[in-house]
Amino acid sequence: MRLIRYLNERRTPYDDEADKIAGILLKSCLPSIKEMRAAKRVLWRGMYGTSSSMNLHITRKDRRPKDAPEFVHKMVDKIFNRKYGWLPRSNSAICSNSYGIAGDYGFPRAVFPIGKYKCIWARGVSDTLDVYPHWIEDFEKRPAIAISTYMHSGERKTYGDIDVISASKEDQLDQLEKIINQIMEVQLSRFQQTGLKEPLKHPMPIEIMVGCKEYYSVESSMMNRVAPLLDLQADNL
């Protein structure tokens, strides 16, 4: 009896909160928890404006790009939609298998998709925007620079010349747009759609686009208390 009383006295409000959070996650997110157990990793997302221990989030269907130009954002969505049937740049939670990478985009929080979900990712790609040459971002606002940079780039050997002598500026841009589409098609062919275990187990930090309707996020210090209650032995906590 003394031992039980001693253990009860050592419990804190944080322990009670961790029990409550673990119960909610086990009830609502068991498929993703099982994949995290198998991978021995936790899914992370950098977030701002969220300070409570656990939050419920509805995945946005109109996510706007923070760094990429709008036309690149739409092009990536179009290519992925043609292949997988959904828009992972506009309608996903952009996550990582790395606590450190998540911290580059906000305060790291563990993410638990609710119900059915799907993941698009590529081996060794920590940011999808890194897969294409950055002169592409000049296409809309600085087209002359984009054309010039392309004509002096390594991609020219693969995709051919732009007629900068006899073609009009409009025709030159049409040619470059077709080339950009070809480049993006090739670069995005590296990506695959799987469950959660495969990208979490990847040995390098990678970006994971998670398609789900809703998800819970758990603050990182609270996650240290919650993980044992979920039987998660993660090496990226």
Image (tube, rainbow, N blue to C red):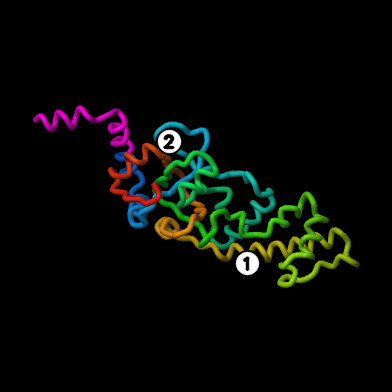
Disc 2 on helix, strand or loop? strand
In magenta segment, residue 6 = yes
Say which quadrant the N terminus sits in: top left
Look at label 1 and name its amino acid.
Answer: Val
* Residue 142 place in picture, x, y as percent: 79, 51
Spot the residue most to the left: 1
Q: Residues within 10 Å of mark 2 (few under 14, many from 20)?
A: some
* Residue 14 place in picture, x, y as percent: 31, 31
Q: Residues within 10 Å of mark 1 (few under 14, many from 20)?
A: few
Quadrant in the picture for residue 190: bottom right
Would residue 98 be found to the left or right of residue 78 on screen? left
Gap in Å between the C-alphas at discs 1 and 2?
38 Å
What residue do we see at 69% from left, 49% from top? 69
Would residue 75 be found to the left or right of residue 15 on screen? right
Which segment is the magenta one? 1-21
- Sequence-wise, the earlier of marks 1 and 2 is 2
Q: Main secondary structure of the magenta part?
A: helix
Residue 55 is labelled as 2
178 lies above or below 54: below
Disc 1 on helix, strand or loop? helix
Residue 204 is labelled as none
Look at label 2 and name its amino acid.
Answer: Asn
* Residue 71 place in picture, x, y as percent: 69, 52
Residue annotated with mark 1: 186
158 lies above or below 133: below
What residue do we see at 30% from left, 28% from top? 13
Spot the residue most to the right: 166
